[in-house]
Image (tube, rainbow, N blue to C red):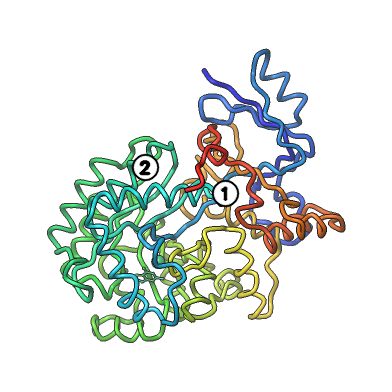
Amino acid sequence: MSATLLRGRVLSFLRKPETIDDNASYHYEEDGGILIRDGRIEAVGDFTSVKAQAGEGVETVDHRPHLLMPGFIDAHVHFPQMQVIASYGAELLDWLNTYTFPEETKFADTQHGRRIARLFLDETVRHGTTTVAAYCSVHRESADAFFAEALSRDMLVIAGKVMMDRNAPEALRDTPQSGYDDTKALIGEWHGKGRLHYAITPRFAITSSPEQMEMAGVLAREHPDLHIQTHLSENHAEIAFTQELYPWSKDYTDIYAHYGLLGEKTLLGHCIHLSEREADALSDAGSVAVFCPTSNLFLGSGLFDWQRYSRRPKPLKIAAASDVGGGTNYSMLRTMDEGYKVIALQGEKLNPLASFWQITLGNAAALSIADRVGTLEMGTDADIVVLDAAATPAMALRMETVRSLAEELFLLQTLGDDRAVREVYLAGAPAKSGLGRN
Ligand code: GUN
Ligand code: ZN
C-alpha cells in the first residue's frame, strides 16, 4: 500500500459556478491536504486533519503556495497531428487535404506511431492535462501505440482509430468491413484495460460512406456503453459538401441521428453552425457539443455560441477542447483564454470559476467520467495538477495585485501555459517532474 500526502491550496468544483462569486460551487482549502493511497484519493480537507488521518510514515510533498486541482481534461484532440499544428493559411477542407491527410499517412509506420504517441502524452502531461479524448489515425497500429503508451502511464484516456473510407487519399482509407473489424479488435484488446476507454470514431460524414456509417451504427448498438466521437458543423464548405453527400438528410445532425450515433456518450467536435432544430436534437439525445476555440479561430471556422447553447430552453451539454493540430495549443489554460475571447466577441464574459469548472468537473461530467476524474471526491482517481500563478515574471508581478481566488484563476488562464504547471500526478504518481526535455 503506497500512500502520499500532498500539501497546498486545494480547489475542486462541486457544480457549475453561475457567477464570479458563486462560492458554494467549489471547495477551497487554504492549507489543504490530499491523501493518496494506491492511486486513489483517500481523504481531502485541511492539512492538519488529513495528516492525522494519514498516520505515521506517510511521505508529505509540500506544494505550498501552489494550487492543487483535479487534472485538466481535453475533450477532443488528434494525436497524429503533432506535426500539423501551426500549418499556414487554409480553411478546414484545404487544411485537411494539404497538411493533415499527408501527415496522417505516416502512421502506417508503427515506429512513427509509437514515437508520436509517447511525445504527445509527454506534451499533454507537461501542460497539466491528465485525460484526453483522442482521435488516432485510420491505422489500427496507431491506436495500439496510443493505448499502450497511455496504459504504461496509467492514464485515463478515451480514444479510437478513425474510420474513413472515402474523400481521402487511398493510403488513409479503410473499408466498411475493415473499419468495423479493426474497431472490434481494438475494443477487445484495450477497452477496460487499466483506465482505457475505446471510442467508436467515424471521422465525419464526409469521409465515411453510407455503408461505413451503417457499420459505425452497428458498433454503437453492439457496444452501447462506449463513447462515440466525430465532427459536426465546423465550417460552411464542409456543411454544404456533407449535404450533397447525404441529400436525403434534414441537416448535418440528422445524418448522425439516422445511423444511431447520437447518445449521451457522443462527443461532437465544433458544433459551430447548428440550427435550432439541430441543437434541439442534440439536447434531446444528451449528446455533447465540444467547444474548440483555438482551432475555430485558427481555421477561421466561426464563433461557438456558448450563451445560446447553454441558455436555450433545451440546453446543450458542452465540453471544451484543444483540437490539436487544428487547435494551436496543448494547454487548457490557453484554450480557455481563447474561449473567453470567443464568448466576449458575442457580448458576454465567461467567469473564471466557470472556466476552471469546465476543464475539470464540467468536462468530466460531459464525458461521463466524473465518477473517476475531474473531482477530488474520496475514492476517485488521484489525477492532480499543481498550478503556480506566479510562474513567470509577468505573472508574478500581476499576482502582487490579485485579491481573490477568482482573480488568481483568471490570471492563470490569461497568462498561464505549461510554465504554470509545477507538477502533475497521474493516479497518484508524479508525472511531469520525470519528463525528459525531448
Ligand atoms: N473534421 C474532420 N477531421 C478533422 C480534423 O482532423 N480536424 C478538424 N478540426 N476538423 C476535422
Ligand atoms: Zn477534430
Seen as rendered, the residue at the extreme top is 56
Which three-letter amino acid code belongs to the residue tagged 1? Gly
Q: Nearer the viewer, residue 130 or 126?
A: 126
Residue shown at 37% from the left, 50% from the top: 117
Horizontal and vertical percent position of residue 60: 68, 25
Tell me if 55 is positioned left or right of 134 in this view: right
Residue 330: x %, y % from top left? 52, 59
Q: Amino acid at mark 2?
A: Glu
Q: Is residue 245 shown left or right of residue 80?
A: left
Q: Is residue 225 visible?
A: no
User: Which residue is painted at 29% across and 64% down in the image?
Assistant: 104
Q: Is the residue marked 2 within 8 Å of ligand 2, measured from its CB?
A: no
| Residue on which the image places disc 1 | 128
Residue 321, numbered label: none
Q: Quadrant of residue 309?
A: bottom right
Q: CA distance from mark 2 to mark 1?
A: 17 Å
Q: Nearer the viewer, residue 164 or 17?
A: 164
Residue 429 at least partly seen: yes
Is label 1's Cβ within 8 Å of ligand 2? no
Q: Is residue 169 above or below residue 182?
A: below
Q: Quadrant of residue 99?
A: bottom left
Of mark 2 and mark 1, the one earlier in the sequence is 1
Q: Secondary structure at mark 2?
A: helix
According to the picture, the residue beneath numbered tag 2 turns out to be: 149
Neighbour class for label 2 at 10 Å: few (<14), some, many (≥20)? many
Percent coordinates x, y for residue 218 in the rendering: 20, 57
Mark 1 Cα shell of 10 Å, populated few (<14), some (14-19), many (≥20) = many
Q: Is residue 411 above or below residue 249?
A: above
53 vs 223, left or right, is right
Q: Nearer the viewer, residue 347 or 72?
A: 72
In the image, residue 379 above or below residue 24: above
Q: Which one is nearer the viewer's eye here, 90 or 378?
A: 90
